[in-house]
Amino acid sequence: AQSVAQPEDQVNVAEGNPLTVKCTYSVSGNPYLFWYVQYPNRGLQFLLKYITGDNLVKGSYGFEAEFNKSQTSFHLKKPSALVSDSALYFCAVGAKAAGNKLTFGGGTRVLVKP
Amino acid sequence: DTAVSQTPKYLVTQMGNDKSIKCEQNLGHDTMYWYKQDSKKFLKIMFSYNNKELIINETVPNRFSPKSPDKAHLNLHINSLELGDSAVYFCASTPSGGPQETQYFGPGTRLLVL
C-alpha cells in the first residue's frame, strides 16, 4: 500500500524567509508525486508534480520541489515566502501499481508572518 | 468559467435525512472522483468513475451511493445521514484516470449533520 507522511502539522516562517514543507512517501514502483495547496474554504489547487526526468520541479507561485529517490522525499520549497502563501499544503503520491488512486498526506499548515 | 463545480456549497440537515450532492466538470475529462475531508483536514478518496463506470470504491458505508449519468457529472447520494458524515466533500476530475494526471478539484460541499 502506498502512503505519504508530512511530519509537520504546522510550519511558521517570517515573510521573506525560505519556506520548506516536508514530505516522504512509500510506494511500489515508480512514484508520481504532487503538491496541492488549499486556501480557507476553497478546494485544492495544483502546485506542481514529479512524473519523470529532472529531479527539481518548478511550479506555480514560485514554488519548487526536489524528488529524492534514495530518501523517498519530495519536499516543497520557496526561496522567499509571502504572507499570501499562508495555507494548507498537501503532498500526494500515485503509482501504476496502485491503480488510479492518489494517496494524500495529512497536510501541513503554513503560516507566514509579516 | 468554473472547471469543476459542486452544488450545494453548504448543506445543513438532520440525522436520518437523505441528501444529494452534485458535481459537474466542463473540462472534457473522462474520470471523476469523490473525496471526503474530515475535521482534521485528512483527505480520503471515496469513489472514482471513468466514463460512467465505477472503478474505485473504497470502504465506504452502503449509505453512500454515487451515480454518474454521463461523464461530465458525478453525483453523491447519502441515505440515513449520521453525525459522522459531517465533513467537506470534494469532487475532482482527471483526463483519463492515470495516476500521473493532475486532479482538478471543485470548491467543496460543506455538510453538517445535526
Image (cartoon, coloured by chain):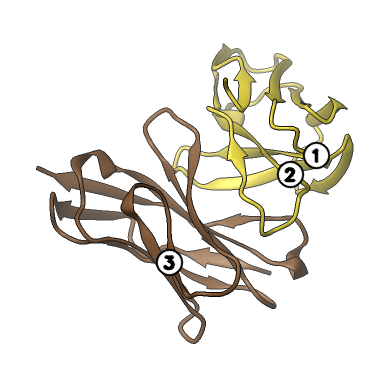
Chain colours: A brown, B yellow
Q: Is residue B28 above or below residue A98?
A: above
Which image quarter holds the N terminus of chain B?
Answer: top right
Q: Which residue is mark 3?
A: A23
Residue kind at label 3, given as amino acid type: Cys
Viewer-side label of 3, 1? 1
Judging by the rendered image, the residue that carries numbered circle 1 is B30
Are discs 3 and 2 less than 8 Å apart at CB? Answer: no
**Callouts 2 and 1 in the same chain:** yes
Label annotation for residue B16: none
Mark 2: few, some, or many residues within 10 Å (few <14, many ≥20)?
Answer: some
Q: CA distance from mark 3 to mark 2?
A: 26 Å
Residue A33 falls in which quadrant of the image? Answer: bottom right
Nearer-the-camera pick, B30 or B6: B30
Residue at x 42%, y 62% (from the top left corner): A6
Q: Chain of mark 1?
A: B
Residue at the (19%, 41%) spot, across then down:
A83
**CA gap, disc 2 to disc 1?**
5 Å
- Residue B24 placement (x, y as % from top left): 70, 23
Residue at x 48%, y 41% (from the top left corner):
A45
Give the residue pinned by disc 2. Answer: B95
CB contact under 8 Å: marks 3 and 1? no
**Vertical placement of A101 versus A57: above or below?**
above
Q: Look at the numbered disc 3 and give the secondary structure of its residue.
A: loop
Marks 2 and 1: CB-CB under 8 Å? yes
Name the subunit of mark 3: A
Q: Earlier in the sequence, mark 2 or mark 1?
A: 1
- Residue A98: x and y in percent read 74, 65
